[in-house]
Image: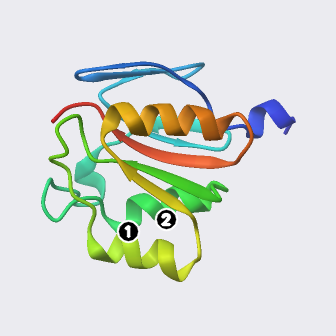
Amino acid sequence: MTIDEQRSPRIADCHWGRVTIDGHGTVKDAKLYPGGARAWDWRETGTRHDPGIQPADVVELLDHGANVVVLSTGVFRRLGVSPQALLLLNDKKVPFHVLPTPDAVAEYNCLAKTQAVGALIHSTC
């Protein structure tokens, strides 16, 4: 793999209900990590607004080589982050940012310039 293939892809645009990722198309919610991105289907891991992001979602980012993580809580901060997901990140000593979506997108794109960053981006509520 080349260095470019291992970089975390840039979020080109994020508006209500859609996230456009350079080289990966447009999805409703997104999982981004070094070398790739895909749609974030909450049903896969049991993510719900409450209690929020599940550890399995975070593990996928780490398994793809993320050494810093950005978690978006939605435009209106309606998506929680489960205590277990936060405990996982703390236990593994992985730096993380929990931010409303517009701030999460900006932080992710900034980090992606220089770091192996992973993100979970929720494009609505």
Q: Nearer the viewer, residue 1 or 6?
A: 6
Q: Is residue 114 above or below residue 63?
A: above
Q: Residue at x 45, y 54 (%)?
A: 97
In x, y percent, where is residue 92?
Answer: 57, 78
Question: Percent from the top left, x then y, of residue 118?
Answer: 55, 48
Classify residue 119 as left or right of residue 54.
right
Q: Which residue position is annotated with label 1?
A: 55
To which quarter of the image does residue 82 belong?
Answer: bottom left
Question: Residue flagged by tag 1: what amino acid is it?
Answer: Pro
Q: Residues within 10 Å of mark 1 (few under 14, many from 20)?
A: many
Residue found at x 60% / y 19%: 23
Q: Quadrant of residue 67?
A: bottom right
Residues at discs 2 and 1 in contact (Cβ within 8 Å): yes
Residue 34: numbered disc:
none
- Height in image: 96 above or below 43? below
Residue reaching furthest to the bottom: 91
In the rendered image, the quadrant that contains the C terminus is top left
Whole-Å distance between the Cαs marked 2 and 1? 6 Å
Q: Mark 2: which amino acid? A: Val
Is residue 15 in view from this perspective?
yes
Residue at 49 percent across and 77 percent down: it is 90
Regarding mark 2 in the picture, which secondary structure is present there? helix
Q: Image check: 119 left or right of 41?
A: right
Q: Which residue is mark 2?
A: 59
Q: Secondary structure at mark 1?
A: helix
Task: Give the colour scheme shown.
Answer: rainbow
- Residue 57 locus on image (x, y percent): 40, 58
For the N terminus, the image quarter is: top right
Q: Residues within 10 Å of mark 2 (few under 14, many from 20)?
A: some
**Relative height, residue 15 to residue 102 (above, below):** above
Visible in this render: residue 30?
Answer: no
